[in-house]
Image: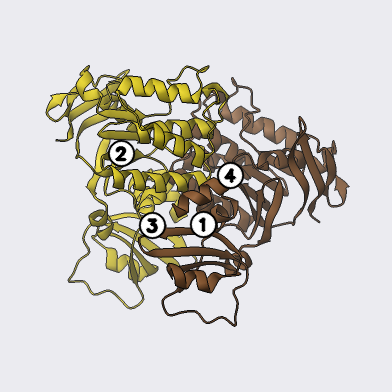
Chain colours: A brown, B yellow
């Protein structure tokens, strides 16, 4: 019982977008799929939901390919930036269309959510602002009866109040009716406490794949006078650094050396998820800007 | 020496967008201008920068109106969502055009920033992604020789790495060359440590106007068993609440009652800026969703 992505490559016009991806989405779990702009997150989500074919590799749901498999695809929903809705349709009509398509739809919850978010269900889709188009798509994603919900940039254009309301409703609907959510977003710190497992996609590869507490447990910020920090972190997996005034911070991903005493001048703390992500995925030029 | 917004009203098609706004932007200071989607932030910025006229009221720079005043407007720059650039032009040409228009432009810094952000200065504006259009506009805003820089949604579409780089460069250019920055954004917590003074625009009015440390000093989260919390906060200015398991949290903006002892079961902490904002500006429906 899971979605398995196996050996997936994607090549567009001779350029590698995804290179041999292998990952698993288990039932009833909340995932984060993180990556920089252009890292290939949306491509991966489009492959999983059968919107585009992979160049190589397979995506299976409970062992069966999802490719053109209506039974499997009926269990997967992708909320994406693309608007696939008839512009003239009214919101309440679109709720009904979704119900016809999926055989079921939580209209009661959709109505409650529309009220909480201030979405007018009589409005036409074409008349909605960017923020309210996102809200409409979010509501559909939370009310559609599927086992796997993929959310690509679910808070795009939302103000802080609407983001908070979304996170809260996501936890509530997940508690009432466990299923799998995969959240792809640039607002990493805001979902750090929501997600159980994180994938980081960088340079066409999965570079982090693990449970969030385990990942954070081996992510460190080590700060203090430059020489002391450099001596202590020498040989460790340094993924980034900052200099502010006389203080140097080295960011380390991976085990510390238990045999090495921590100097009194040096402070060892854990990184938060966003800082870990930024350090792991910075380009050389960006990393250099922190040192200058 | 300041920008003064005095008695500004804005009415569109009979609807009040801004109602009697009075605010001051002093030299060499970093401000946050916060508001929900649709609160009128962009309208206010467009009035200040003379892109649209106010229905009533005045905006002055050092005592002189900015309305159609080229000398004053040469000291103000607004980076906005609207793209005012010829689509076919190349980035480096656009840097030159800005230099001609403003008489000066920090081309050295612009080139350094383009490199740090990975922006190709030979690319045509029309070929840039949403994120890179924002980056181009940010670079112009940081390099243009003006006293007042207004940034409307400066991190729209940027990934976490580019946001971090922008915040860092903003601090650096501000330290090297102090001037006024006014940042309007939905990513409130990310700028909370950058801004000195905050304005919150809600329901057509300025509802918060103060130095950030002062504002946060009188913002509280009071949590514990429901009855104890309710007893302690009774009569205080409660702006929001949350319930999680058996714990109730009340959010209070304004002074506590020094004569009231804090029960042992109750925890008093300060709110962060984003949570304060959300609580102050939630609609009734949103507030209700926190209680259910």
Pointer 4 chain: A
- Contact? badges 1 and 3 (CB < 8 Å): no
Give the CA distance from mark 3 to mark 2. 30 Å
Give the CA distance from mark 2 to mark 1. 25 Å
Q: In the visual, does A143 lie left or right of B291?
A: right
Residue B158 visible:
yes
Quadrant containing the N terminus of chain B is top left
User: Where does label 3 land, which residue?
Assistant: B241
Which mark is in front, 3 or 2?
Answer: 2
Which mark is in front, 4 or 2?
Answer: 2
Which mark is in front, 1 or 4?
Answer: 1
Relative vertical location of residue B120 with respect to residue B189 in this rendering, above or below: above
Q: Would you call the spot at circle 3 few (<14 residues within 10 Å), some (14-19), or many (20 or more)? A: some
User: Where does label 4 land, which residue?
Assistant: A109
User: Where does label 2 land, which residue?
Assistant: B182
User: Where does label 1 land, which residue?
Assistant: A275
Same chain under badges 3 and 2? The reply is yes
């Amino acid at each position: 019982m899971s979605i398995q992505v196996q050996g997936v490559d994607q090549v567009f016009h001779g350029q590698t977008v995804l290179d041999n991806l292998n990952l698993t989405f288990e039932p009833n779990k909340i995932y984060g799929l993180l990556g920089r702009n252009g890292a290939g997150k949306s491509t991966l989500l489009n492959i999983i939901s059968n919107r585009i074919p992979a160049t190589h590799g397979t995506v299976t749901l409970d062992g069966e390919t999802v490719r053109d498999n209506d039974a499997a695809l009926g269990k997967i929903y992708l909320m994406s930036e693309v608007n696939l809705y008839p512009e003239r349709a009214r919101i309440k009509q679109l709720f009904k269309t979704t119900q016809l398509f999926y055989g079921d739809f939580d209209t009661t919850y959709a109505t409650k959510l529309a009220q909480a978010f201030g979405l007018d269900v009589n409005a036409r889709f074409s008349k909605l602002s960017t923020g309210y188009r996102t809200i409409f798509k979010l509501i559909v994603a939370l009310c559609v009866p599927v086992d796997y919900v993929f959310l690509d940039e679910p808070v795009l254009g939302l103000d802080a109040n609407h983001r908070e309301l979304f996170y809260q409703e996501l936890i509530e609907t997940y508690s009432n009716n466990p299923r799998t959510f995969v959240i792809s977003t640039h607002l990493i710190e805001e979902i750090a406490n929501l997600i159980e497992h994180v994938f980081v996609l960088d340079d066409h590869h999965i570079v982090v794949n693990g449970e969030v507490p385990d990942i954070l447990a081996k992510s460190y910020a080590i700060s203090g006078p430059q020489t002391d920090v450099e001596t202590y972190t020498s040989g460790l997996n340094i993924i980034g650094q900052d200099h502010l005034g006389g203080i140097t911070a080295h960011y380390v991903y991976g085990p510390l050396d238990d045999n090495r005493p921590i100097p009194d001048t040096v402070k060892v703390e854990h990184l938060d998820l966003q800082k870990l992500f930024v350090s792991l995925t910075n380009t050389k030029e960006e990393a250099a800007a922190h040192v200058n």
